[in-house]
Structure formats: structure tokens, C-alpha cells
Image (cartoon, rainbow, N blue to C red):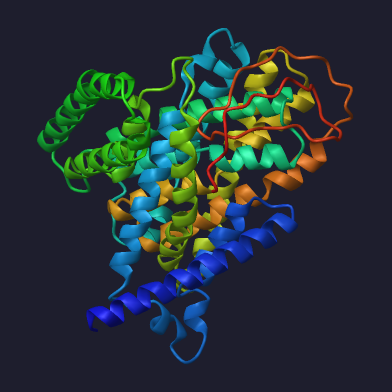
Amino acid sequence: MSSESVVSHVVAALAVVIAASYALGALARRLGQPTVVGQLFAGIALGPSLLGLVPGQVYETLFPAQIQPILTSLAQVALVLFLFVVGYELDLGMLRGQRAVTAVSLSGFVLPMAMGAGIVLLLPGAFASVNGGHPIDTTFVLYMAIALSITAVPVLASIIRDQGLAGTRPGTVAMASAGVIDALSWPVLAVVLVGGEHGSVRDWVLKAGLLVLYVLVMLFGVRPALEWWMRRPGPQASARLPVAVTVALASAWATNALGLHVIFGALLAGVIMPRLPDGSPDGRLLRPLQDIGGLLLPVFFAVSGLAVKLGGLRSSDLVLLVVICAAAVVSKVAAGSLSARGTRLPWRESLLIGVLLNTRGLTELIVLNVGLQAGVIGPRLYALLVVMALVTTAGTGPLIGLLRRPADGPPAVPVDLVIGTGETLEPRPGPDAGRMPTADAGPAPRA
């Protein structure tokens, strides 16, 4: 295939991907689901599972093998920008004095991890048969623990807004806790994967040491330099965006060179990026990054869908899928509900918090792609986990509908957020429990 033909195919594929993602995302919203559910289904529909079944080699014509590396590269750039924004908005200061958020965060992280590791230890043969020859070792057990612990903050913000829970005690506690859970999950995932698929103990120690050194350089070298540059006098405001993108891409390259995924460097770059004097993220920097990332994220969904081969699943895999979904739902709902109830929140609000924490979606998909690329999980298990992410995310809205209560809940103490999304959670009229003041942190990523 000539270079002109490759360019032509890439342009056509991007047009189809963006249009399909927008259309099915809008349809999902009409059906009361988060946009990401429609976008993820669009990615699967454009892959071999659905489009590949159409006669006439439509799938092979639209996505020839020669352009798939280019689409994968664009998807990685989208992830770098998205995770940079998440890191830039990350603020763990909300934990100070917030007993409910602390309790829900820790339990919502630890219990799902224990459940994820537990089902692997109880059913090693089932996971071995579905994992395509990849070893069921300590790395795999810890990876599955992380995979079940994830809560998708951007998707959760959208659900809270759409369900009229913005500013309520359950919505506020769930959002803050989800941000803390993801903040805990990323470094643990980095530690799990730092040794690579077949790395020795020596390799693991070496790469872990280099990673720690890199983090220290970013915190005590790059961050002070960025603070000096952004606060110096002169018309440098217009250069903030290219500088931020350069730092994000360079940091992503550095962690990739260390044997990790590019997302870890992007997150770290966002964390060390200086904020405004009042501690809030700079909207002039966030908004264009969110726009660019939102435009490219459909490519990530498409690339993720290309790796989902539902036709390769066996009947026995469906039993394991039920086990994984049950473990994912029970661990999240139980952890959130019991820990919130332990801080003396009403039972219905506590259950609502647990249901909200069960939202996965985009963040889960990122973790699954990291595991697939690192060789920790195989294509069949990847497909099962993608379906789990869809099921748990799509089930959040209906479960919330069963738990809604009249707007007569007790007043609540405000909790300052939002974390990791930039979401402006404006309350909508309706039957909301325990209404709280709204927190505003700018526009949200379109994911």
C-alpha cells in the first residue's frame, strides 16, 4: 500500500470512527446511559465482532492492517492528553477532615482488590484456560485485583449530573472517593507492571529504582522549573499549552522507555504541572486539552474495539464472565455501602454511594488496554473484562433509579471537590437526597 493510500485510508477510518462514536454516544444518552457506553459499543461494532461479520470484507477494507499502527498511535496520544488532565486536576486535599470520603475510598479500593485476587486464587484453572497461555502468576493476580478496583471518575461525574445527584451527599462522597481510589490504583498498577511480562527480580528492582528516581526528578526538578517559567514576567501565557503538551508527551515517552505504559508519565506530568495561586487548575490550559482529547478519544474506543473478538469466546467463558461481573458488583457496592454506613450515613444514601462506585467505563478500558499490551492478559480474557466494564457501567443508572428518595433528606456538610474530571456538577430539579452545595472546577473531559 502506497503512502497516499495509507493516508486516504486513515482519513476515511477517522471519519467513520468519529461519526459512529458521536451517533452511538448520543443514542446512549437518549437511553439514559453515559455517552461512554455508546462510544465503547461503537468501537466494538466497528471491530471484527460485528463489522467483521458483514460480507464483502467491509472491515478489512475500512481498517486494513497497514493503518492500525497509525490509529493505535493516535489513540495513545489521546490517552496521554486525557490522563494529563486527570493528573492536573487531582487534589487529595479533600480528604482532610472528611471521614466518610476516607472510609469509602479505602474500603472501595481494598475490598474489590481482595475480591479480584480471590477469584483468581479460587479459580486458577478457569483463568488459565481463558488467558491464552499467559501465566497465572503474582503479576496476573495483582493485575486482576486492580482491574476490579477501578472506578471511572469522568463517567461517574456524567452519571451524577444526569441523575440529578450533583451537590447531594451521596454524589459528593462518591465522586471524591472515586478520585482517591483511582489515585491509589495508578501507582499500584505501575508497581505491578514495572517488571514486564517475564522480568526477573533484578529487572524489577532496577526498573522500580529508575521509576522512583524519575518521579523525584519530576517533583523536585521539572516542577520548580515549570513554576519559575510560568510565573516569570512577560507574555508567556499563550505558550502554556504547547509547553504542557510537550511535558506530557516527553514524560509519557520516559515512562514508556522504563518499560511502563505512556499513561503513567502523562499522569505524573499532570500532577506536577503548577496550578493557579489559589490552587485550582488553569482553565486556559484545561479547556483546549479537553477539547483535543475529547476529539481523539473515539479513536481509542475504536482501537479497543478492534481487539475485542466476541466470536472467539466459548460457552465456558460465559460462566467466568458471570463470576467476574458478580465479584466486581458485589465488592464495590458492599465496600461503598458498608463503609458509608459505618460513618453513620443513612442506609439508602450508603447503598447509593456503593452503586455509584460500581461505575467503570473509560478508566477501566484504559487499564485493560495496558494489561493487554503488557501481555498480562490475553484476547479472550480482555473481551470478557470489556463486557464486564460495559455491564457494570450500564447497570449504574437503573440501580440508582431503584434507590432514589424524595428530597427530604437531612442537610449535609459540604465536601469540596471535584477531582480528576473538571466536571461542573450543577444540580437539576428532582428528587435528590441530602442536597449539598455545588462544587465547580471547570469543564469536564468529553469521555
Residue 261 shown left or right of residue 22 in the figure:
left
Q: Nearer the viewer, residue 81 or 95?
A: 81
Residue 258 appears in which quarter of the rendering?
top left
Q: Is residue 362 above or below residue 149?
A: below
Please name the residue shown 62% across and 37% down the image.
Answer: 157
Residue 423 % position (x, y)? 59, 35
Image quadrant occupied by the N terminus:
bottom left
Query: Can residue 6 be seen by looking at this rendering?
Result: yes
Residue 319 % position (x, y)? 55, 58
Residue 276 appears in which quarter of the rendering?
top left
Residue 194 shown left or right of residue 16 in the figure:
left
Q: Is residue 306 above or below residue 346?
A: below
Please name the residue shown 53% across and 40% down the image.
Answer: 152
Residue 65 shown left or right of residue 195 in the figure:
right
Query: Can residue 114 be seen by looking at this rendering?
Result: no
Q: Is residue 205 above or below residue 134?
A: above
Residue 302 % position (x, y)? 45, 64
Please name the residue shown 54% across and 23% down the image.
Answer: 105
